[in-house]
Every structure is written in C-alpha cells, then in structure tokens.
Image (cartoon, rainbow, N blue to C red):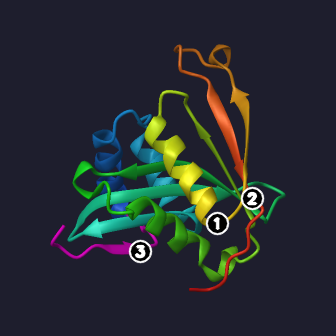
Amino acid sequence: MNKQINIVQPTKKHAKEIFKLVNRCKPLDINSEYLYLLQTTYFKDTCSVALMGNKAIGFISGYLVPNKKDTLFIWQVAVDEIARGEGLAKKLLLEILQRDNLQEVEYIHTTISPSNIPSQKFFEKFASDLNTTIKKSILFDKDDFNNGHEQEVLYEIGPFKKGKK
C-alpha cells in the first residue's frame, strides 16, 4: 500500500466512516450508527481507527470490563480489504494497549463466532506474540440470540506484560 496510514484515537467525526467500514467488512455484525457515535465519544479511550486520508480503513472497538481495570474487552476488529495482510489489526490493538490510561491492562477478552476464522487466527497470533495463553469457553450460545446468530466463543488472553514502545 502506497498511501500513508495514520492510526489515531477516534473522535465523533470518524463515526460515519467507521460505520461504512464495518459495513464493508463481512461477516462482522453491523451495529447502529448511534453505537459508533458512542464508541467514538464515550469509549474513545479504548478504540482506535486507521485512516487513509479521511477514509477509515481499520477500526478496533473495546472497553474496560466493569470492575476489572486489568481487562480490555475487544468488541470489533474491522480491517478494509485494501489493508489486509499488512498487520494493521495488530498495530491498532497495540496502539490502544500503549496508552497511558491502560497501563494496568494484562488481559484481553473478546468473543469470536466459530465461522470467523480470520479473527481466530489474529487473536491466536496476537497471544503468541505477547507470549501468553488463550482460554476459550462459550459465552453466548445460539439459543441466547433471537435471530439464529452463531454461538460466541470467549477468548481470554493473558496475563501479559507490556512496556511503552
């Protein structure tokens, strides 16, 4: 890829582009535009967006698990087709983890549908890169959803230590 990519903490002005990006990234679940506005305002400290010009080509959303300052839940990872294979998801996640307000984080939790092989591979490699383990368990079964959604497997990654880079 020839164009410069900037990875930044999102702001409200990025919400529309993030919504478009997630729409382009099948099989991700599409959330409401309102949610992406919330993520880029109230949850911006635990989200990261990759921009090529004004276009969002990568996004990770997350939040600190309530009552667990050491656990970051990653909700969505979206990388545009034009940026895949470049290690962008890892760069986005590392950018979040290196923030001063997240220095206590030693665990990452995320859920992944069994059919989402790229996400499984990404988090398995990420855990390996951090020299830590993954514990897997079913968090939400198919019966927990109204619309026949696949089960969601909880990936508990950690503990890990990180230094400022």
- For the residues labelled 2 and 1, say whether their Cβ atoms are less than 8 Å apart: yes
For residue 83, side relative to residue 38 (left or right):
left
Q: Disc 2 residue type?
A: Gly
- Give me the C-alpha separation between circle 3 and circle 1: 22 Å
The prevailing secondary structure element of the residues shown in magenta is loop
Residue 125 screen position, x and y as percent: 55, 55
For residue 107, side relative to residue 88 (left or right):
right
Q: Earlier in the sequence, mark 3 or mark 1?
A: 3
How many other residues sit within 10 Å of disc 1, few (<14), some (14-19) or many (≥20)?
A: some
Numbered mark located on residue 130 in the image? 1
Q: Quadrant of residue 14?
A: bottom left
- For the residues labelled 3 and 2, say whether their Cβ atoms are less than 8 Å apart: no
Q: Disc 3 residue type?
A: Val
From the viewer's side, name the closer residue of 153 and 42: 153
Q: Quadrant of residue 132?
A: bottom right
Q: Which residue position holds label 2?
A: 158
Quadrant of the image for the C terminus?
A: bottom right
Residue 90 screen position, x and y as percent: 47, 63
Q: Residue at x 53, y 13 (%)?
A: 148
Residue 43 screen position, x and y as percent: 57, 61
Numbered mark located on residue 80 in the image? none
Element on which disc 3 rests: strand
- Give me the C-alpha separation between circle 3 and circle 2: 25 Å
Residue 2 sits inside the magenta stretch: yes
For residue 20, side relative to residue 161 (left or right):
left
Q: Which residue position holds label 3?
A: 8
- For the residues labelled 3 and 1, say whether their Cβ atoms are less than 8 Å apart: no
